[in-house]
């Protein structure tokens, strides 16, 4: 039988009796298979009782943590040339197909098998899927018998021609089911697809849900179908609905248009991620001729949100207010399960991000299906990468276009209904190798952009470029995509912002192409830029004096300086993020990365034993078991939506301090927050305080305001006596969460002039700011 197109993703009904999870124990036989064929190993009559057993989803193959102690012939983490192309395994398990599924269509779906697989059911070959990050499904109705067992088999393929597209260099040779798999049933006349765009008008007062629903009829006669669409708020009340009817010819599909208006919807953003449910109900399906046909009503439920992202040459705005993405790169990787990241662990991971004031993720892998669900719920902006990685050697090659377009289409179709998905990040660091193939390579990149725009015209695109390497100082990629992007270096973007012109390489040969700001805007650039990778640091927590952990930096560290690792990290992040934070045309950035992939050895595992790191370095601000490294806390402070000055000068006679803050929340006015202040004079126990006072503060999102804090008697006495004083500011948001505690050291003029107490430790790099 022919497999469905690999981008098909049939909606599942909410009824639990129509879905069978394939999670659990599978039988395993690793290659070589001796004289047995794959078909024989997949046959339902085969006795597999002597085979090994392995839990799936999870790892079947994994990198040997100790392998790098000896040479590995033909080793390449990018193309896996050291692995035999026939290497892999065959997985199989039996599942009982419910008798109640008789008369229904039965679908077999794998959300992801990494890096590739061939599929069988009851010994019948269904087809290959040469993509480890995107879903694949097959209609197996004619190959299973409801009321009987079915044998599902997966032939893992560890290496294939297109494997580097899926960024295997970060996967540590993982092979196995990377996401859930299941059998599910749909009625013979069913919702086969839908695309419903949730949009918000310019006044932010009216939401619309519009698009179409595809009804598929596999009954032998024409069917009359009735479909309802309801939008439901969190209290369960309907805020909009419509009903559509159509006659669907036998064996064909029909599209039903949908348009619903929602007045004054609650808006979605990172601080208030308000969600609505969309309920698609197939209420009735009957023979168009009037003959009786019993098909129970079914419903499909998903969540949506209403928000409006606008990109202009003067900046980015979400729901009418300035927005800044305080992002990190998220590499989907679990310390024990590899590419399989269970949802409860992923929730814990994302919650930790929120506690670090992270509000955005750039996926560096197409993340699992549940990632977008969690970002919707928790309030994280998602810059979703579509998996076409490091295409230098193939981006020009027509043979690679079908697998690339399949990956792009599958990723967009899967996640385009999620409000958290803000930008489609199309591939990663894809630049042609030589001038001779450059035209073909750029043509293919523009085709990628066209496909994304066709599948989802509601979201902007971005094409992450290579960073500085070889003879190339860096790239600002504004020749394709709506959002310009740059990696690691900020020298080019600073010159471009000043001069309005940039030279970018057309290929790795360094043949430069000049682009002006006006040309880029005319081509379709929005005027907004992003840095989807920056700040890279080998953040090994044990290395306390490791300034050379900072790599690919505009300001290289002196390896012999003895500088504290945390200081080197904080200085670089403050310099790079501080520039992006204050630049109006910058949407934000994604620090690379949040967590590093690594294969651990023995009982200690990752991170407590010997670890083989995916890129030979322990990038990331948290450990594999989600413990914050010291660098986590520096990131949390610098990613706070509000910054406070580190030092202020005090003039004799002043009874208060004044300073300016910039509110970089998107929807929270600082008048709804609490500014809790503690004060102390300069002395041996200056840091120990218990009393506090709340200070009035008010500032709309995106604006700046002056803060005035009256000084108490103790600090004033200390300042009058020529010593410093301490003002500690803790900000509490409307929910009570504390994004930052900051100490302001108030220093009298005499100390600023050099008459400083040698016993007072104030830090070598602090900058004095005069009182306003």
Image (spheres, rainbow, N blue to C red):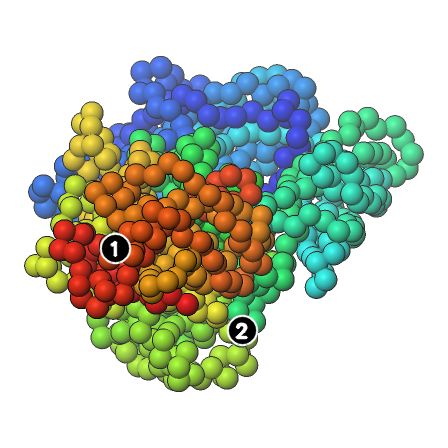
Say which quarter of the image contains residue 389: bottom left
Q: Is residue 605 above or below residue 567?
A: above
Q: Residue at x 50, y 84 (%)?
A: 518
Quarter where residue 552 is shown: bottom left
Counting residues from the N terminus, which is met first, the one under dot 2 or under dot 1? 2
Residue 537, position as x, y percentages in the image: 24, 54
> Is residue 434 shown left or right of residue 73?
right
Q: Which one is closest to the eye, mark 2 or mark 1?
A: 1
Residue at the spot of label 2: 314
Instruction: Please state which of residues 638 and 18 is positioned toward the viewer in this rendering.
Output: 638
The kind of secondary structure element at disc 2 is loop
Q: Position of residue 758 (x, y in %)?
A: 13, 55
Q: Nearer the viewer, residue 275 or 769?
A: 769
Judge whether residue 522 can be spotted in this image: yes
* Residue toward you, 255 or 484: 484
Q: Residues within 10 Å of mark 1 (few under 14, many from 20)?
A: few
Q: Is residue 327 at least partly visible in the picture?
A: no
Q: Which residue is mark 1?
A: 721
The answer to whether 180 is drawn above or below residue 360 in the figure is above
- Could you say where residue 318 lies in the image, as x and y percent from the top left? 59, 59
Q: Residue furthest top?
A: 49
User: Tags 2 and 1 in contact by the CB under 8 Å rule?
Assistant: no
- Position of 10 relative to 186 (above/below): below
Q: Secondary structure at mark 1?
A: loop
Q: Which quadrant would the C terminus be assigned to in this image?
A: bottom left
Residue at image coords 56%, 24%: 20
Give neighbour class at mark 2: few <14, some 14-19, many 20+ (Cα, 10 Å).
few
Distance in Å between CA atoms under marks 2 and 1: 48 Å
Q: In the displayed structure, does residue 530 sit left or right of residue 666?
A: left
């Amino acid at each position: 039988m022919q497999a469905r197109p690999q981008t098909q993703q049939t909606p599942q009904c909410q009824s639990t009796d129509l879905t069978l999870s394939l999670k659990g124990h599978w039988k395993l036989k690793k290659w070589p298979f001796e004289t047995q064929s794959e078909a024989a190993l997949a046959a339902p009559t085969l006795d597999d009782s002597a085979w090994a057993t392995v839990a799936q989803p999870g790892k079947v193959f994994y990198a040997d943590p100790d392998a790098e102690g000896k040479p590995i012939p033909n080793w390449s983490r990018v193309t896996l040339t050291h692995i035999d192309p026939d290497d892999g395994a065959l997985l199989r398990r039996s599942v009982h197909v419910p008798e109640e599924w008789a008369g229904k269509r039965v679908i077999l779906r794998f959300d992801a098998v990494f890096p590739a697989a061939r599929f069988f059911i009851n010994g019948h070959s269904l087809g290959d899927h040469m993509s480890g990050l995107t879903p694949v499904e097959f209609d197996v109705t004619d190959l299973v018998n409801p009321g009987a067992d079915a044998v599902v088999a997966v032939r893992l393929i560890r290496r294939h021609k297109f494997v580097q597209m899926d960024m295997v260099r970060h996967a540590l040779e993982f092979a196995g089911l990377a996401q859930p798999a299941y059998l599910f049933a749909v009625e013979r006349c069913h919702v086969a697809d839908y695309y419903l765009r949730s949009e918000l008008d310019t006044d932010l007062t009216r939401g619309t849900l519009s698009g179409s629903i595809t009804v598929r009829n596999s009954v032998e006669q024409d069917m009359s179908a009735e479909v309802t669409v309801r939008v439901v708020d969190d209290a369960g009340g309907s805020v909009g609905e419509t009903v559509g009817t159509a006659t669907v010819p036998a064996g064909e599909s029909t599209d039903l248009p949908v348009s619903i208006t929602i007045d004054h919807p609650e808006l979605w953003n990172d601080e208030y991620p308000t969600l609505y449910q969309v309920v698609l109900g197939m209420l009735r399906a009957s023979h168009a001729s009037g003959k009786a046909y019993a098909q129970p009503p079914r419903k499909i439920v998903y969540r949506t949100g209403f928000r409006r992202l606008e990109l202009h040459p003067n900046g980015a705005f979400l729901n009418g207010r300035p927005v800044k993405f305080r992002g990190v790169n998220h590499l989907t990787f679990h310390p024990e399960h590899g590419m399989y990241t269970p949802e409860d662990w992923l929730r814990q991971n994302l919650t930790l991000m929120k506690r670090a004031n992270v509000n955005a993720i750039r996926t560096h892998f197409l993340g699992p299906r549940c990632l977008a669900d969690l970002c919707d719920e928790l309030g994280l902006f998602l810059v979703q990468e579509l998996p076409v990685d490091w295409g230098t050697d193939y981006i020009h090659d027509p043979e690679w276009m079908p697998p690339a377009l399949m990956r792009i289409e599958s990723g967009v179709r899967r996640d385009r209904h999620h409000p958290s998905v803000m930008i489609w990040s199309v591939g990663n660091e894809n630049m042609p190798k030589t001038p001779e193939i450059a035209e073909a390579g750029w043509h293919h990149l523009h085709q990628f952009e066209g496909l994304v725009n066709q599948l989802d015209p509601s979201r902007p695109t971005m094409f992450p470029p290579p960073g500085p390497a070889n003879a190339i100082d860096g790239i600002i990629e504004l020749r394709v995509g709506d959002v310009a992007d740059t990696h690691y270096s900020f020298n080019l973007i600073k010159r471009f912002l000043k001069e309005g012109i940039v030279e970018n390489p057309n290929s790795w040969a360094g043949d430069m192409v000049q682009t002006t700001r006006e040309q880029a805007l005319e081509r379709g650039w929005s005027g907004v830029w992003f840095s989807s990778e920056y700040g890279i640091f080998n953040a090994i927590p044990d290395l306390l004096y490791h300034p050379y952990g900072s790599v690919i930096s505009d300001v290289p560290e002196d390896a012999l300086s003895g500088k504290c690792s945390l200081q080197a990290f904080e200085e670089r992040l403050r310099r790079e993020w501080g520039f992006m934070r204050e630049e109006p045309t910058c949407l934000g950035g994604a620090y690379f990365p949040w967590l590093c992939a690594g294969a651990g050895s023995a009982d200690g595992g990752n991170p407590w034993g010997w670890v083989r790191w995916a890129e030979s370095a322990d990038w990331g601000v948290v450990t594999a078991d989600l413990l914050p490294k010291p660098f986590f806390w520096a990131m949390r402070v610098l990613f706070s939506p509000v910054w406070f000055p580190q030092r202020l000068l005090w003039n004799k006679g002043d009874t208060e301090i004044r300073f300016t803050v910039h509110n970089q929340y998107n929807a929270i006015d600082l008048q709804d927050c609490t500014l809790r202040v503690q004060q102390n004079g300069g002395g041996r126990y200056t840091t120990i305080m218990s009393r506090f006072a709340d200070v009035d503060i008010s500032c709309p999102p995106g604006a700046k305001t002056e803060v005035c804090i009256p000084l108490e008697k103790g600090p004033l006495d200390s300042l009058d006596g020529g010593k410093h004083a301490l003002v500690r500011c803790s900000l509490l948001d409307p929910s009570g969460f504390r994004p930052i505690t900051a100490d302001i050291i108030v220093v009298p003029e005499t100390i600023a002039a050099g008459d400083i107490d040698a016993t007072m430790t104030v830090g070598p790099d602090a900058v004095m700011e005069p009182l306003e």
